[in-house]
Amino acid sequence: MPIRIKLIIMSLLFLAVPSLLIGIIGYQSSRNSLKTLGAESLQTDVRMTIEMIEALDKQVKTGKVLLEDAQEQVKEAILGKKDANGNRPINPRLNLGKHGFIFIINSAGVELAHPNFEGMDVWEIKTTDGVYSTKEVVRAANNGGGFVTYEWPLPDNPNVHIPKITYAEKDPNWDWIVCAGAYLPDFNAGANRVLYILLFTLGISLLAGVIVILWFSKKMTKPIIQVAEQVKLIARGDYTQEPIEITSKDEIGELVLNFNIMKENQKKAILKQKEYQERIEYMAFHDDLTKLPNLRYIKEKLTQEMQSHKPFTLLILDVDRFKQSNEALGHSIADLILKSVADRLKEQFPSHVFVGRLTGDEFAIIYPGLNQEDEWISVCKQIQSRINEPLQVKNLLLNVSVTIGSVVYNNNKIEVDEFLKHANMALMEAQQQQVPFQMYQPSMDGKAFDRLVLENHLHHALQRNELRLVYQPQVDIGTGQIQGVEALLRWHHPSYGFISPAEFIPIAENTGLIIPIGEWVLRTACRQIKEWHDQGLSFLQIAVNLSSRQFYSQDLIETVKGILLETGLPPGDLELEITESMMMNMEHASKTLQDLKHLGCKIAIDDFGTGYSSLNYLKHLPIHRLKIDQSFIRDLAENEQDDTIVSTIISMAQHLQLDVIAEGVETPEQMDILRKKQCTHVQGYLYSPPLAPENFLQQWDQLLQKANTLASELNE
């Protein structure tokens, strides 16, 4: 039952029951009071009649009035004159009710004055309730006056007997018994009128009470009902309702206020929890740095795409030389590079193309509907074109590139992890082949396994003495003099034979093996060139490549210093080759190169023109030589752009008073072009391939003769 109905019923009960009790008590009290007043009225009427008899009796005794006349005067006064039938009317002026009247009898029971029975002997009359009323009246009068109750016929309807009360008292003058009687219904009429008034008043009060209760209950229960309704909604998780209006300052108002506060706090807590859960969910499926979907999200997306049974292509992008950038510039700059690449990818593709970050410097693109080779090539070129645009990071202008591995899904049954593995195989194949993008082919499965085996074997290559150094001469293009050699690393595997540096160097970089291998290369090269010095080739210098990890290791200077002391090689005969990407962190690069210069070592920039685009370091760092990358030399005779780049590098070196050497020279035509551009030194298969130490000494005379011959031919 609703609380409002309960409140109304309870209020009505609390209002009606006391009102009824008050009415009943009031009725009974009024009835008793009216009975008392009625009895007193009967007594008063009787005694006034006796007083009238006494007054007339005095006149009778003085002779002024005859006794019979005085007695008739009394009878007419209390009743009225007799009519033709000998009956007297009831005196309406007496307050004895409709049927009440005063009558007189004597002690013998004869009616001396009566509306109907005057002159009759009523001594033996027995009323319907078994009472000898006349006898009782006489007895009460003789006892000094009293009341008698009995049933008596109505004056106007003798067949109807009604309870009657009579007061009787004896007149001492004429020996009359004066009686005043009233029928009980008339006697109680006043009390009944009070009852009707009470009932009417009670009804009006109850009606007014109901109206007030309805209004009050509605006003009082409205906020409570609203609280109850909102509690139901809250139980279902609905907190959208507006706060409940506070209409009073009592306990209910305080309840509503506290409920509103509680609901608002609960709402805030739930919203906060929801935001926290959404944040947790977002963090679980997104990369915190780039805000792109992470590996987990990518796998879910791949699952969804596969379940749709529609073709799509997965492209995995790897940022080239990112580890070097990370080591050179620090994590903060590297993170900015990743964010910039992510932003460019998001901006480049429409919303239906899914872009995510796998791990580290790898990104994934899920491209629906892309399954045609020409379309795939176009997309890859667009990606690389956009990524290759110069990237401004703080005060640096960087050249960033990516390598792409792809795999097509054509409703073939394959697991997500296997599908990702295929894309990674394609990426590794592209990196191995040094091509910008590669599509997965089933034949790559064996290569991936071979790379894994290769990585495992590389961990033991140093201990098993499988690594070798070969040396390629560096020649003065004008004089034909061999002025130095570059130490190049080779791996001779007992089972696989010679393994290309393009295969194992990236593995060494990724695994960190490049640090111990690089230290071994530096020590071995310095020991070998010192040995040749001791054998009469003291003019030879040795060029050794430093990896990015070596360059940014904290103990590089101490390692170089220790090896020079250990081998006895003069520091001036050691040239350390670094790449442009190592220059991105100018503060570290400057300090490291200055420390190397203080040791007496020379510094060459390897693969110049292919990496870090800022040339600011050339005038601020102690650089001795620039090495023109072989990619510019390969098509030098046919490619006008390569020709322009080479001319620019040589001119720049001359103006900065730096030596310059071109690597990868394989034809006399290339050498002739370089000589005309005033390139001072060259290195390449035109003069000699890289040679093992023992072959280098054996072929020294031939090498020197070939270099001199080429120089002579150029000078002719």
Image: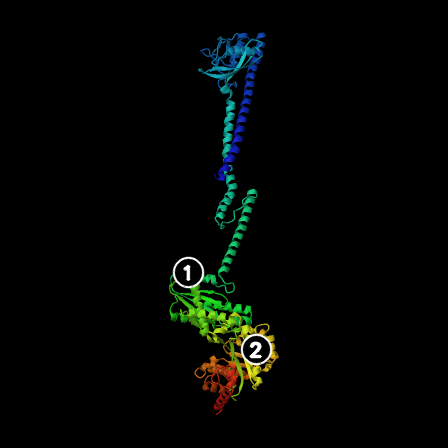
Which residue is located at x 52 percent, y 39 percent? 216
Q: Nearer the viewer, residue 193 or 556?
A: 556
Label 1: few (<14), some or many (≥20) within 10 Å? Answer: few
Q: Amino acid at mark 1?
A: Gln
Mark 2, residue position = 523
Check disc 2: other Cα within 10 Å, few if <14, some if 14-19, many if 20+.
Answer: some
Give the x, y percent position of residue 503: 47, 74
- Residue 446 versus residue 54: which sits nearer the camera? 446
* Disc on the earlier residue, 1 or 2: 1
In this figure, which colouring scheme has been used for the structure?
rainbow
Q: Secondary structure at mark 2?
A: helix
Mark 1: secondary structure: helix
* Residue 587 versus residue 303 in the image, above or below: below
Label annotation for residue 210? none
In the image, what residue occupies the spot 40% across and 70% down? 443
Cα distance in 3D space between marks 1 and 2: 55 Å
| Residue that numbered label 1 is attached to | 304
Say which of marks 1 and 2 sits in front.
2
Place of residue 652 in the rendered image (x, y in percent of width and height, measured from the top left): 53, 82
Apparent side of residue 583 relative to residue 418 in the rendered image (left or right)? right
